[in-house]
Image (tube, helix red, strand yellow):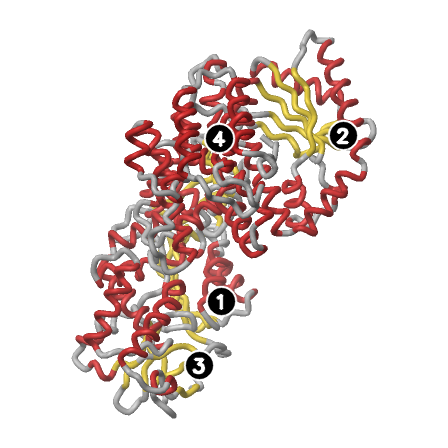
């Protein structure tokens, strides 16, 4: 796997090497199909060279070598040899299907990038490539295994590319392909991809760790050999003769702990690892007891991944102990089947299928793929898929329990909201609070391994998730389910919200066209976001499927091109900024100076809220939240549309604003005192408070408090939710 060869070999030599590995594998490969694929690839790529100077066809042949080492089947090997012919040569997909069958053609198509389709940005192209790859992967997991081998060889030979290109590819590899390799359990590929990427992204740190490992390499090897011998001798006394091997932690693994957790090299306790492979699960636990008798275990450093497997089906016992030399090291104990899965992951299905005694769990291992695709099917922004991969396929997981004892696996940093949606979308949508180990926690509480989480729900009609949750959740699954709820349940509201948000951003960026031209312009923009109509476009903005922060820069570029064509005048005449007056209230009113501003009591807007202004008779401009019940959904169709004006907050507002909160809690002694004490500790002014008579054991309070913005308000809400008994705190919409 780690043989980085190719640059100094001829095509014939690479072909010989590929066939040597095939014969060494002793697997029943279709040698005729492999030979025909080699001939087609050599002919199609004839005359093509790589950046490093070798014949291009060496690349797919060496990708095939990697896949042979992984133990993949004949169709995968043939597809890997042909994986670039459709993209880079005149060969058509139909030709591949005719000569090698539909399965090989599907694999080639799944790996083929979308370079021939125009995209506005590199990010969009990357996102669409990932989308296609994942969809093909859901049909046949071998697609991603070929792609990983392809990326691995490209990273091994990336030195010939320009520096910026190297960094772009290394970042993409670290963000997308290494996490995918981890989730598929292919450890060797994952670690090599990470190390190759890190060497480019942070070469100084990489060399520092590499030098530290090399400094005392002889002593380290001597130590590991000594530990292995001692373990073998002790286990032999119990008539156990397992396979024992030592290894050094990967450079990227050390890097994460040194530079991301702020530890020194000497503070990393699992640089050394000893692996003990036995025949049965009972042997695993017996060996664990013997190891703990031989060496002193470190507290809180034991992990049982056998009873609680990782999300990639990894199983093993991990314990960190200290030797008599006072050197800590990790011991990993597993069966042979666990070892195959740990090393080769999903590829073990092909490499060791005949050697696994019990029923293979391929379908179980692929379940997450289909779930991931299901979560992404309604995503309008393709770039969301890339962001989901970075979080959902993180190498670090936490294992959390339901009250019934079921295990839920989540990425580090996931919240109780993520937990609720991991159980079921209906649970998340009806969630009003959560308990962790029996105590009420705020909704942004990040769960930890071993905790028991109980989701508190409501059956009240009309209740659903908050838009604020989109900024709290960690997983793409939760984010997409929240968006799906708003998409399906609040379409009209989303349309109005999205239209208002878009109008605000268009005004802020001085994008102005006649009404008929603007509609045409926006319709073109909606098509780029895969929206059939303007209402679909507005709705997608409203529920967060399309992010204005991402599309506005592209819209500005398109507008500037359009404006130059339609108005051949000087650039300064194209866009004239409206006069802005910085009012004392912290609000900017476009096109108006010296105007009195007051904040509407019906909705009490605070900095951060989307707002709109209404020109009153004799009292200046009244500022409302955009979703206030007194604001028409479509101001252009209001009775007096000219009296509604665009306003927005100043960048820095330093004053107090009133906000009303509704609090629901289990009634108990001193509840009101605890609420007021909590607010006082935050130096929050209470302008009004109204407590209602308890019903069914619950008390309800209405609080009007002083805050300086939306972030401050959310902080107040979070602190109130930490009070024992408080189950829900909502901001008043009226």
Q: Name the foreground residue: 715 vs 326.
A: 326
- Tag 2 residue: 322
Label located before the other in sequence (4 or 3): 4
Q: Where is residue 347 in the image (x, y as percent from the top left)?
A: 47, 26
Q: Residues within 10 Å of mark 3 (few under 14, many from 20)?
A: some
Q: Distance between the residues labelled 4 and 1?
A: 56 Å
Q: Distance between the residues labelled 3 and 2?
A: 61 Å
Residue 615 appears in which quarter of the rendering? bottom left
- Of the two numbered discs 1 and 3 in the rendering, the one whose residue sits closer to the viewer: 3
In the drawing, does residue 276 fall left or right of residue 121?
A: right
Residue 64: assigned label: 4
Tag 1's secondary structure? helix
Q: Where is residue 93 in the image (x, y as percent from the top left)?
A: 31, 37
Report how many numbered discs are placed on residues in the image. Answer: 4
- Tag 3 residue: 586
Residue 523 appears in which quarter of the rendering? bottom left
């Amino acid at each position: 796997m780690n043989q980085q060869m190719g640059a100094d070999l001829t095509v014939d030599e690479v072909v010989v090497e590929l066939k040597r590995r095939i014969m060494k594998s002793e697997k029943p490969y279709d040698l005729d199909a492999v030979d025909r694929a080699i001939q087609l690839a050599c002919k199609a790529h004839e005359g093509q060279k790589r950046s490093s100077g070798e014949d291009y066809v060496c690349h797919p042949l060496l990708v095939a070598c990697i896949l042979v080492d992984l133990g993949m089947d004949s169709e995968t090997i043939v597809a890997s040899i042909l994986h670039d012919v459709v993209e880079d040569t005149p060969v058509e997909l139909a030709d591949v299907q005719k000569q090698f069958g539909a399965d090989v053609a599907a694999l080639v198509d799944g790996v083929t990038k979308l370079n021939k389709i125009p995209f506005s940005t590199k990010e969009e192209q990357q996102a669409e490539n990932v989308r296609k790859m994942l969809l093909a992967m859901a049909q046949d997991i071998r697609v991603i295994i070929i792609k990983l081998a392809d990326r691995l060889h490209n990273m091994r030979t990336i030195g010939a590319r320009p520096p910026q290109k190297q960094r772009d590819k290394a970042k993409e590899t670290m963000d997308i392909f290494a996490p995918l390799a981890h989730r598929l359990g292919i450890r060797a590929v994952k670690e090599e991809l990470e190390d190759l990427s890190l060497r480019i992204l942070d070469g100084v740190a990489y060399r520092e760790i590499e030098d530290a490992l090399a400094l005392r390499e002889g002593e380290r090897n001597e130590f590991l050999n000594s530990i292995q011998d001692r373990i073998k001798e002790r286990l032999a006394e119990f008539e156990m003769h397992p396979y024992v091997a030592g290894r050094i932690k990967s450079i990227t693994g050390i890097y994460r702990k040194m530079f991301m957790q702020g530890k020194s090299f000497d503070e990393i306790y699992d640089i050394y690892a000893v692996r003990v492979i036995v025949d049965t699960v009972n042997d695993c636990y017996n060996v664990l007891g013997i190891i703990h008798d031989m060496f002193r275990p470190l507290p809180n450093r034991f992990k049982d991944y056998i009873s609680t497997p990782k999300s990639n089906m990894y199983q093993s016992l991990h314990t960190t102990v200290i030797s008599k030399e006072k050197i800590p090291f990790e011991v990993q104990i597993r069966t042979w089947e666990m070892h195959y899965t740990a090393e080769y992951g999903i590829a073990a299905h092909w490499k060791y299928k005949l050697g696994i005694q019990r029923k293979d769990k391929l379908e179980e291992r692929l379940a997450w793929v289909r779930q991931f695709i299901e979560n992404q099917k309604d995503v309008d922004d393709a770039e969301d898929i890339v962001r989901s991969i970075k979080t959902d396929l993180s190498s670090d997981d936490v294992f959390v329990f339901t009250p019934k004892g079921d295990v839920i696996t989540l990425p580090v940093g996931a919240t109780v909201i993520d937990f609720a949606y991991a159980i079921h979308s209906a649970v998340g949508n009806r969630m009003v609070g959560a308990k962790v180990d029996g105590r009420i926690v705020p909704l942004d509480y990040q769960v930890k391994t071993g905790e028991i989480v109980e989701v508190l729900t409501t059956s009240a009609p009309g209740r659903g998730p908050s838009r604020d949750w989109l900024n709290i959740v960690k997983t793409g699954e939760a984010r997409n389910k929240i968006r799906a709820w708003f998409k399906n349940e609040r379409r009209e509201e989303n349309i109005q919200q999205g239209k208002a948000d878009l109008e605000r951003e268009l005004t802020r960026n001085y994008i102005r066209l006649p009404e008929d031209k603007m509609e045409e312009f926006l319709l073109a923009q909606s098509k780029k976001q895969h929206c059939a109509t303007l209402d679909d476009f507005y709705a997608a903005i409203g529920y967060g499927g399309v992010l204005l922060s991402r599309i506005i820069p592209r819209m500005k570029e398109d507008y500037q091109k359009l404006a130059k064509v339609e108005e051949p005048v000087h650039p300064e005449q194209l866009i004239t900024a409206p006069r802005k007056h910085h009012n004392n209230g912290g609000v900017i009113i476009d096109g108006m100076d010296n105007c009195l501003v007051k904040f509407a009591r019906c909705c009490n807007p605070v900095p951060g809220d989307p707002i709109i202004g209404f020109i009153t008779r004799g009292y200046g401009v009244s500022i409302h939240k955009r979703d206030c019940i007194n604001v028409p959904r479509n101001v252009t169709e209001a009775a007096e549309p000219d009296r509604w004006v665009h306003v927005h907050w100043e960048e820095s507002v330093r004053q107090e604003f009133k906000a009303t909160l509704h609090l629901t809690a289990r009634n108990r002694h001193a509840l009101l005192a605890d609420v007021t004490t909590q607010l006082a500790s935050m130096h929050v002014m209470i302008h009004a408070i109204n407590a209602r008579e308890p019903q069914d054991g619950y008390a309800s309070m209405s609080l009007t408090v002083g805050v300086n913005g939306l972030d401050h308000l959310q902080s107040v809400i979070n602190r109130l939710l930490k009070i024992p008994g408080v189950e829900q705190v909502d901001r008043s919409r009226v």
